Amino acid sequence: MDRIKDPHIVRLIEQLGEHYRTNISNRFLRPVLLQIQIDKNTWDQIEVLTEKMELYRYQGFHLDELYRQIAACARFVEVARNRTAIKSRQLSLPPGPDKILREMAVSNFGSNLKVFADLLHELFISLVEMDKKDVGDERPAVYTQMPELYNIGRLLVGG
């Protein structure tokens, strides 16, 4: 498969990254999120998908790499879904001049995480459709060969 340059996919990745940086990994929540027990490789994959868009915008994305990045983000969503952990850790942060903004970020974390999960799911579904179309009946689609993708729906939906 050639590199993915589909405008719909690129727009979804841009939207996903913007939402992540603004609403999830912002200056109020990032210190707390970094305390979540996720391995470095997962954090690296999340960072590539949500913050390093410029590296791939013109040269295109590799499908298998996008799938791995989505799987990493889905693991993050599953772990971060426990909002009480975020709230209790946030409460231990020292008070500051942005207390109200920080409280807003924390109180909206659950709904912002759901939006992030929904965007990830939409990206995943779009990639799967493209993957199936590209391989046709010739060979198995890439996503069927990646065990880490088998439970993506459950991780993103929370079921």
Image (tube, rainbow, N blue to C red):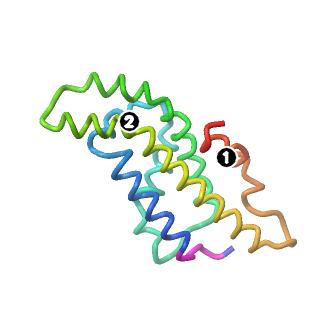
Count the labels in the image.
2
**In magenta segment, residue 6:** yes
Residue sitting at 48 percent across and 50 percent down? 115
Q: Report whether 25 appears left or right of 155.
A: left
Left or right position of 155 against 33: right
Place of residue 61 in the rendered image (x, y in percent of width and height, measured from the top left): 55, 69
Which one is closest to the eye, mark 1 or mark 2?
Answer: 1
Q: Is residue 131 above or below residue 105?
A: below
Residue under the point 44% across and 31% down: 36
Q: Secondary structure at mark 1?
A: helix
From the viewer's perspective, tell me whether residue 22 is left or right of residue 117. Answer: left
The image quadrant where one finds the C terminus is top right
* Magenta stretch prevailing secondary structure: loop
Q: Is residue 159 above or below residue 142?
A: above
Judge whether residue 116 is colored magenta: no
Front residue of 126/144: it is 126
At x 19%, y 34%, the residue is 99
- Disc 1 designates what residue? 153
105 lies above or below 37:
below
Q: Mark 1 is on which residue type?
A: Gly
Q: Quadrant of the N terminus?
A: bottom right
Q: To which residue does mark 2 refer?
A: 34
Where disc 2 sits, the SS reads: loop
Q: How far across and down, in percent of the image, does residue 150 sit?
A: 73, 46
Give the residues drawn in magenta, as a range.
2-7
Q: Position of residue 76 (x, y in %)?
A: 51, 40
Whole-number angstrom distance, CA of label 1 to CA of label 2: 24 Å
Residue at coordinates 70% horizontally, 62% vertically from top-left? 128
Indicate which disc, 1 or 2, sits on the residue closer to the N terminus: 2
